[in-house]
Image (tube, rainbow, N blue to C red):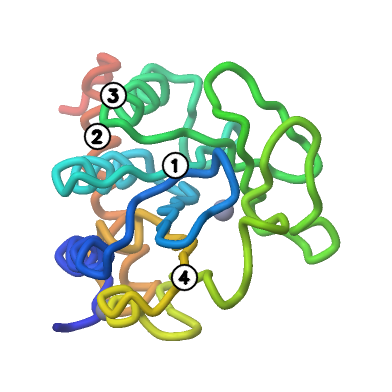
């Protein structure tokens, strides 16, 4: 098995979690023994989020997608954004807010759960009013947390430990873009994402009746 950042290996991670006896849980209560909380911070691409969401659904897994309302990369208020939320919900996933500190505007689009985008240590783990902070006590512990940040596992890919049932529970943070677009490094992956984005944008321009002749 190659620990690359691909949809194939993401599917293998889900398999490993199942083989290890874990169940897929959400942020509606502190994780219990045997829970795997699949967390996705959607920083860059709703398309990537939806592709991962479809894969999870076909593997019988549900996750929590944290979406931004003030991203420079996508517009959650657009038709595309509203349809993305609808599709995520339709597949059985949860939707939380990927907020930019200090703004925390939870509206009816979101469950009462928040993940800060690029948080500073001062507020990263602090409880928030009226919602769960995914990094607060009870939901976060370095021993039961893994993240793929910048296409790098700080403590190694968790597939083996999942398969062995070695974690009491796990919060697994993955960024959909990293798994959906090809590349051996974050730089390559981002360039692949931008190539795909260019095609998508050309389609949007045509839809918007822009003459591309
Ligand atoms: Zn692996
Ligand atoms: Zn983020």
Q: How crowded is mark 3: few (under 14 residues within 10 Å), some or many (20 or more)?
A: few
Q: Quadrant of the C terminus?
A: top left
For the point 24% across and 77% down, the residue is 4
The Cα–Cα distance between marks 4 and 2, rounded to whole angstroms, is: 47 Å
Q: Residues within 10 Å of mark 1 (few under 14, many from 20)?
A: many
Q: Mark 3 points at which residue?
A: 90
On screen, residue 203 above or below 32: above
On screen, residue 36 above or below 164: above
Q: Name the residue under label 1.
A: 65
Q: Nearer the viewer, residue 21 or 106?
A: 21
Q: Mark 4 points at which residue?
A: 168
For the point 39% across and 26% down, the residue is 85
* Lower position in the chain sequence, tag 4 or tag 1: 1
- x, y percentage for residue 205? 28, 26
On screen, residue 194 above or below 141: above
* Lower position in the chain sequence, tag 2 or tag 3: 3
The Cα–Cα distance between marks 3 and 1, rounded to whole angstroms, is: 13 Å
- x, y percentage for residue 123? 82, 56
Q: What element carries label 4?
A: loop
For the point 24% across and 50% down, the residue is 196
Q: Is residue 145 left or right of residue 134?
A: left
The Cα–Cα distance between marks 3 and 4, rounded to whole angstroms, is: 30 Å
User: What is the number of the mark on residue 202?
Assistant: 2
Label 4 or label 1, whichever lies nearer to me, is 4
Picture quadrant of residue 124: bottom right
* Lower position in the chain sequence, tag 2 or tag 1: 1
């Amino acid at each position: 098995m190659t620990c690359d950042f691909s949809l194939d290996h993401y599917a293998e991670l889900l398999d490993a979690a199942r083989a290890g006896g874990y169940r897929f849980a959400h942020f509606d209560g502190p994780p219990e023994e045997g829970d795997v909380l699949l967390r996705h911070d959607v920083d860059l691409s709703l398309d990537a989020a939806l592709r991962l969401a479809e894969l999870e659904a076909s593997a019988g897994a549900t996750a929590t997608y944290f979406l931004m309302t003030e991203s420079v990369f996508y517009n959650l208020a657009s038709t595309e954004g509203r349809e993305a939320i609808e599709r995520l919900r339709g597949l059985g996933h949860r939707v939380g807010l990927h907020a930019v500190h200090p703004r925390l505007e939870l509206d009816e689009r979101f469950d009462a759960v928040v993940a800060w985008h690029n948080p500073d240590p001062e507020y990263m783990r602090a409880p928030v009013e009226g919602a769960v902070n995914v990094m607060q006590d009870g939901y976060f512990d370095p021993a039961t947390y893994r993240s793929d940040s910048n296409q790098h596992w700080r403590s190694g890919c968790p597939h083996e430990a999942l398969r062995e049932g070695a974690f009491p529970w796990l919060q697994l943070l993955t960024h959909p873009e990293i798994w959906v677009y090809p590349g051996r490094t974050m730089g390559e992956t981002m360039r692949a994402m931008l190539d795909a984005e260019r095609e998508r944008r050309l389609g949007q321009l045509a839809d918007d009746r822009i003459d591309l002749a």
